[in-house]
Amino acid sequence: MTKRLIQVTKNLIKPDQPLFCPIYKEDGTLLVRKGYVLSHSQVSALNKHENLFTFAKDLRRSSPEYRKRSARKRDTYNQKRSTQSPFVRLQKMRDELIRIYEKPDDIHALDDILRTLERLEIVCEDAPDAALATIFVDPDDHYTVRHALHVGILCYMMAEQLNWDEAMTRSLVGAALTMNLSMGLAQDGLQAQAEPLTKEQKRMIHIHPIESARMLMKMGLKDKTWLNFIANHHENLDGSGYPRKLKMDDIPLGASMLHLADVYCAKVTGRRYREPILANVAAKEVFLDKDTKSQNNLIEVFIRILGIYPPGVMVRLNNGENAVVVKRGERVDTPSVRSLLETRGKIIMNTANRNTAKDEFAIQEVLFPNRLNQYTNFSALWGFTSK
C-alpha cells in the first residue's frame, strides 16, 4: 500500500476548506478522509506529523494547484489552435508522448495522456486532411509515439464515419495512444531491428496488450471500454491472434478498428529491413486480408476515409507532373493534388491545384515520398503558418 502513496505538501492543506484528497501516515494509516473540513487547530495538529501522504491518483486529480495549472495550459492551447499549424501541434504531441512512454509511472501521466488525447481530437476536427497526411510525411524518428498518433488519427476518423458518440470515440482514440504503453520506447529498437526477435522480445510483444491495460488501471484509468479495446487489439477474427485467441463476435468492434489502423500504419511505414509499402498497395492488402475481409462494412469505411490516394502521398500525373495529395476528393480515386517543381535539387510548390478527375491530371502512379520529406514545408503546403 505504501508504495502507491506520495508525500503531500503541507501548505496545500487549508483550514475551513474540504480536503481535496485523503491524508495518510507513511504506513498507510488513514488520518483524515477526503472532503473533511478541518478547523485551524486540526490543521495545526495534522501538520505536527513529520510527513503526510496520499494516493498519487487522488493528488493528481484533485489538487487545486494542479487544476489551475491544467486550466492555464488548456487556455493557452485554445488561444493558439486557430493559427498554429497542425503539423507543429502534432510534433508537440509526439514530444509529450515520448515523456509519457519514458515515465509512465509519473504522477501526472494519466492527465498528460488525456490532454494529448483531447488535442489530437481537436486537430482531427480542425484539419482532417493535414492530420491524415502526417501518416505519410512525418519525420522518420520515434516510431513508437509516431505510430500511436497515426493510429489514433485513423481511429478518430473511423469512429466519426460510424457516428460513434463522444465517449466511445474518446475511448477508442485513447486506446490507440496507449495500446503499446507497456513496451515503452522499445518499439523504436524493434522497428529498426533486422535480426530475429529474441525469446524475451517475443514474450514482451505477446503480453503487451494485457500489460498496457494493467498499467493504465494502475494509473487510475477506470474506462473499461478503453481498457477492453487495448486488451483485445491483437486478436484476429479467425482466432489466430493473441493473447487470448478470440474469434469473431467475441472481439469488440473497437478492438478490430484499432487492429485495422495498426496494421495499415505499420504497412506504410518503412523498416530497416524493408521499404514502406505504397499507400494504394497497402489499401488493397488490407481489403484482401483474410483477418479483416469478413468485416466488409469496416473495410469500406476505412477506404472511404483514406481514399486510394490519401493526403500526404506523392503521385505522378498523366501530364508528367509530380504532385502531392492535399485533399480527399468526392471519389476515393480522385483527390485534389498540388503539383511540385524541382529547382536546383530542391522540391518547391507550384501554385496550381490539380483536379485528378480530369484525364489530363489523372493519377498515373504513386511515388515514394523520400525527397518530399526532406525539402517540403508541409505547413505551407496545407495552407498553414509554421508557427
Image (spheres, rainbow, N blue to C red):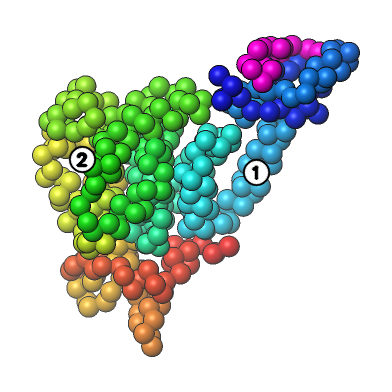
- The answer to whether residue 15 is visible is no
Q: Which residue is mark 1?
A: 73
- Figure quadrant of the C terminus: bottom right
- The magenta stretch is 24-38
Where, by quadrant of the figure, is residue 10 drawn? top right
Indicate the secondary structure of the residue bearing disc 1.
helix
Q: Residue 191 or 196: which is nearer the viewer? A: 196
Magenta-drawn stretch, dominant element (helix, strand or loop):
loop
Q: Residue 95 — which label?
A: none
Q: Residue at x 10, y 39 (%)?
A: 290
Distance (Cα) linking label 2 and label 1:
38 Å
Residue 342 coordinates in the image, percent (x, y): 35, 82
Q: Mark 2 or mark 1, which has the lower sequence index? A: 1
For residue 105, above or below residue 189:
above
Q: Which residue is mark 2?
A: 299
Q: Residue at x 48, y 45 (%)?
A: 102
Indicate the secondary structure of the residue bearing disc 2.
helix
Q: Residue 227 or 360: which is nearer the viewer? A: 227
Q: Residue furthest right?
A: 41
